[in-house]
Image: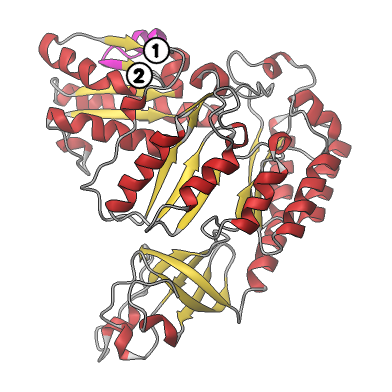
């Protein structure tokens, strides 16, 4: 979501003649987009802003701004804490940002804007047709959250749940496809509850509309709340050909008592029943999840139930974090806090437990042929032998399977591959090797004959 918001910030500033630079030292304007979901993320914000103070002293006309969730949460306090800061703007103020920048340029003033009006500001969502280098793009379909999990700050910094108009979403995606995008990831704090308030169409119906867009190859979405995972959405994985076989389904804990204190509104049995139904309807589906360890009152037995759930589900991968108190949320007042050492130990054990299943699920794919949407050249290029007669054979490309597994590949010795641009194509790759968090393979011969068509 923050990546998408940052893109909208950049697009909104283009009419003011601002363009991106790779160096802070060259910048006339620096915007720090922030996350408040965990304490560590917030600490990083203020550490980075502290380093920018030196740059501000060297360049007094440099405009420094802070946006996002930390800005929404702290508001005027940040401006008081950091006298060299020019601007603090919240999660609903992106559309107002260009006007704020113009005021600061003209009046050398300092501004705080953390107003959160109800509803969606559609003017924020635009397509940059000049950005043709990417294959995949994010698209926000809703904002805010109504779930109020006891540990989560999102409803307080992103506001109540509000969904965008489906026609606007489809129009934005069509514009992205026209600019060269082949895959979209739909974003929402809980996409499963899309449009429940507005009543225009359900999330599965929205997916069906997007599935009909010509030129779009793949659809992903995140994040799903287990309590709202409907049968219609589960069947969409079977019925919609462009919907990728991957779902991120955060569970947070395997203990019913912890889930209740978290206000997650489901039990571990309910969650496992949803997993079973997903795998029955779509046997190839990859399932990933989120976990929090060390929630207040979590006992060793609670933690062991979480390990048991991981063993039962055997996720493709997980994200796991130590619990940390956040401002304004109920769990901050909960008793029986877990020590930092115990949280650290549990996190290590949990990640080690999942590592086995991630590797196991990757190793099963060795020898199979997978359809890969190629995103571009790999960031970790294979070292080129300067004496090689054909250095092209060492160029490494990267892409993802429908199940969201990263695949790096080098064109084989068939020279017809060497000068091709694979970006934006779906090609067949035979998996040769499984690593901890990625796969390596070789494109099959049929991949070269079809140009930009899907193999």
Q: Which residue is painted at 37% across and 33% down in the image?
A: 5
Quadrant for residue 53, please give it.
top left
Instruction: Quote the CA–CA distance across marks 1 and 2.
Output: 7 Å
Front residue of 239/133: it is: 239
| Image position, residue 312 (x, y; %) | 82, 54
| Image position, residue 156 (x, y; %) | 54, 16
Horizontal relation, residue 84 to residue 426: left or right = left
| Image position, residue 58 (x, y; %) | 15, 26
Quick one: label 1 or label 2, which is nearer the N terminus?
A: 2
Q: Quadrant of the C terminus?
A: bottom left
Q: Which residue is painted at 52% across and 34% down in the image?
A: 188
Residue at numbered disc 2: 93
Identify the secondary structure beneath mark 1.
loop
Residue at numbered disc 1: 114
* Colouring scheme, one of rainbow, by chain, secondary structure, one colour: secondary structure
Front residue of 197/46: it is: 197
Residue 233 lies within the magenta run: no
Q: Which residues are magenta?
A: 76-87
Residue 83 lies within the magenta run: yes
Q: Which residue is painted at 66% across and 31% down in the image?
A: 323
Q: Which residue is painted at 15% across and 30% down in the image?
A: 15
| Image position, residue 60 (x, y; %) | 14, 20
């Amino acid at each position: 979501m923050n990546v998408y918001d940052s893109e909208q910030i950049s697009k909104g500033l283009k009419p003011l003649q601002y363009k991106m630079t790779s160096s802070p030292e060259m910048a006339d304007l620096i915007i720090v987009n922030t996350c408040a979901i965990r304490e560590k993320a917030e600490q990083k914000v203020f550490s980075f802003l502290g380093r920018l103070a030196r740059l501000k002293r060297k360049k007094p006309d440099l405009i420094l701004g802070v946006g996002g969730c930390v800005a929404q949460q702290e508001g005027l306090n940040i401006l008081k804490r950091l006298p060299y800061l020019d601007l603090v703007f919240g999660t609903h103020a992106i559309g107002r940002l260009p006007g704020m920048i113009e005021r600061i340029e003209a009046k050398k003033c300092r501004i705080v804007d953390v107003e959160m009006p109800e509803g969606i500001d559609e003017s924020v969502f635009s397509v940059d047709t000049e950005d043709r280098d990417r294959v995949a793009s994010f698209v926000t379909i809703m904002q805010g959250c109504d779930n109020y999990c006891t540990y989560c700050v999102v409803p307080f910094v992103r506001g109540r749940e509000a969904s965008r108009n489906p026609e606007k979403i489809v129009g934005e995606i069509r514009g992205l496809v026209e600019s060269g995008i082949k895959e979209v990831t739909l974003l929402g704090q809980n996409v499963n509850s899309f449009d429940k308030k507005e009543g225009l169409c359900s999330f599965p119906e929205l997916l069906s509309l997007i599935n009909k867009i010509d030129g779009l190859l793949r659809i992903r979405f995140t994040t799903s709340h287990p309590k709202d995972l409907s049968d219609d959405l589960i069947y969409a994985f079977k019925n919609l050909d462009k919907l990728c076989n991957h779902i991120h389904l955060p569970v947070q804990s395997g203990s019913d008592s912890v889930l209740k204190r978290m206000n997650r509104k489901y039990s571990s049995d309910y969650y496992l029943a949803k997993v079973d139904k997903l795998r029955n309807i779509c046997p190839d589906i990859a399932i990933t999840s989120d976990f929090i360890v060390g929630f207040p009152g979590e006992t060793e037995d609670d933690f062991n139930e979480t390990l048991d759930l991981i063993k039962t589900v055997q996720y493709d991968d997980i994200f796991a974090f130590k619990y940390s108190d956040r401002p304004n949320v109920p769990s901050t007042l909960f008793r029986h806090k877990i020590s930092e050492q115990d949280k650290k130990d549990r996190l290590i054990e949990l990640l080690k437990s999942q590592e086995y299943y991630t590797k196991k699920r990757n190793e099963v794919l060795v020898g199979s042929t997978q359809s890969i949407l190629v995103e571009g050249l790999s960031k970790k290029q294979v070292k080129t032998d300067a004496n090689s007669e054909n250095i092209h054979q060492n160029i490494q490309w990267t892409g993802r399977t429908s199940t969201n597994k990263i695949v790096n590949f080098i064109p084989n010795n068939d020279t017809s591959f060497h000068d091709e641009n694979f970006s934006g194509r779906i090609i067949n790759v035979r998996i040769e090797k499984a690593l901890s968090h990625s796969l390596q393979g070789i494109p099959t011969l049929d991949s070269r004959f079809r140009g930009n068509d899907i193999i």
